[in-house]
Every structure is written in structure tokens, then in C-alpha cells.
Image (cartoon, rainbow, N blue to C red):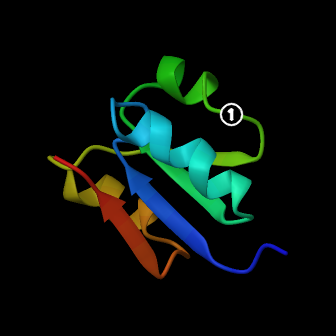
Amino acid sequence: METSTILVVGATGGIGSQLVPALRARGVRVRAMTRTPERAAALPDGVEPVLADLHDPHTIANALQPPRTALHQR
């Protein structure tokens, strides 16, 4: 049963690309933040893509709606 939504920042990167399917397998709703439409198109089914850039504050506000949890890896 899906209940929470988690924003994964860098969802198409090395760690994020492993984290997103693992969260989906556990029934978590995932909003996946990426900078390019091409990478967003490659996300797994059931994942909500959001285009945003950490260097552009205007895009971040949109990315944070409605998740209560955000995961960012370095």
C-alpha cells in the first residue's frame, strides 16, 4: 500500500538510479528529481518525474510539492 511520497534528488545518478527502484519495490511513491527531460523519460514506471536544478531555487519549490521527505546523495 502506497502511503508516503519521497523526493529523490539526483534520481538518475549512480546512487539515485539504485534507490528509486528499491523504494518503488517497497511500495513508496517516488518523485524523481532530474535536470533533463531525457533522463526523466528513462525513469521506471510508476515514478513521478520532476525537472529541477539545485542551482535554481525557483525549480526547487515545485519539486518539493507534496513530499514530506527528500533524499539527496553526494
Classify 10 Å Cα crowding around label 1: few (below 14), some (14-19), many (20 and above). some
Look at 60% across and 22% down and name the residue there.
42
The residue pinned by badge 1 equals 44
The image quarter in which residue 23 lies? bottom right
Q: Position of residue 32 (x, y in %)?
A: 51, 48
Can see residue 27? yes
Relative depth, front residue between 59 and 2: 2
Task: Say which quadrant the N terminus sits in.
Answer: bottom right
Furthest-right residue in this view = 1
Image position, residue 55 (x, y; %):
14, 46
49 up-or-down from 72: above or below? above
Residue at the outermost top position: 38
| Residue 42 to residue 45: above or below | above
Along the line of sight, which residue is nearer the eye, 21 or 57?
Answer: 21
Residue 49, visible in the rendered structure: no
Provide residue 8's location: percent of width, then percent of height. Answer: 43, 54
Q: Amino acid at mark 1?
A: Pro
Where is 3 relative to 33, above or below?
A: below
8 sits left or right of 30 in the view: left
The total of numbered circles placed on residues is: 1
Answer with left or right where residue 48 lies relative to residue 9. right
Callout 1 secondary element: loop
Residue sitting at 43 percent across and 31 percent down? Answer: 12
- Residue at position x 38%, y 68% in the image: 70
Residue at figure coordinates x 56%, y 56% from the top left: 31
Q: Quadrant of residue 2?
A: bottom right
Reply above or below: 29 against 37: below
Whole-percent x, y for residue 27 in the image: 74, 64
Q: Is residue 13 left or right of residue 68?
A: left
Q: Is residue 66 left or right of residue 52?
A: right
